[in-house]
């Protein structure tokens, strides 16, 4: 009987940890989606070192770098 109780406690602990992890991941995904909808980004805005094409290019074909040269 004692072994069964130990397994139940272990199962409940695993279940609680799993619920906490799922809630944390869900909160991160929700925040990222909300920020994206509001126009916020995790990008620093420096396209010179960015490998992603996340920013629009200027009409002259140069990437926006934030520099005034």
Image (cartoon, helix red, strand yellow):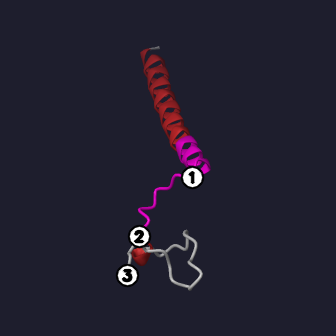
Which stretch did the figure color magenta?
Answer: 29-46
Name the residue tied to disc 3: 69
Of the residues under marks 2 and 1, which one precedes in the sequence? 1
Can you name the residue that lies furthest to the top here?
A: 1
| Residue 3 spot, x, y in % from top left | 44, 20
Identify which residue, 4 or 27, lies in the foreground.
27
| Residue 47 spot, x, y in % from top left | 45, 73
Name the residue tied to disc 1: 39
Q: Quadrant of residue 58?
A: bottom right
Q: Is residue 32 magenta?
A: yes
Whole-number angstrom distance, CA of label 3 to CA of label 2: 14 Å
Name the residue tied to disc 2: 46
Can you name the residue that lies furthest to the right here?
A: 37
Q: Residues within 10 Å of mark 1 (few under 14, many from 20)?
A: few
Residue at image position (41%, 77%) is 48
Labels 3 & 2 near each other (Cβ < 8 A):
no
Position of the C terminus, as image quadrant, is bottom left
Identify which residue, 28 or 25, lies in the foreground.
28
63 versus 43 height, above or below: below
Residue at image position (51%, 29%) is 15
Residue at image position (54%, 69%) is 55
> Does residue 25 appear to the left or right of 59 in the view shown?
left
Q: Residues within 10 Å of mark 3 (few under 14, many from 20)?
A: few
| Residue 54 spot, x, y in % from top left | 55, 69
Identify which residue, 19 or 36, lies in the foreground.
36
**Image mark for residue 51:** none
């Amino acid at each position: 009987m004692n072994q069964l109780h130990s397994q139940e406690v272990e199962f409940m602990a695993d279940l609680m940890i799993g619920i906490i992890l799922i809630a944390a991941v869900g909160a991160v995904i929700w925040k990222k989606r909300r920020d994206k909808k509001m126009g916020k980004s995790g990008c620093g805005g420096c396209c010179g070192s960015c490998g992603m094409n996340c920013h629009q290019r200027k009409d002259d074909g140069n990437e926006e770098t934030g520099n005034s040269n």
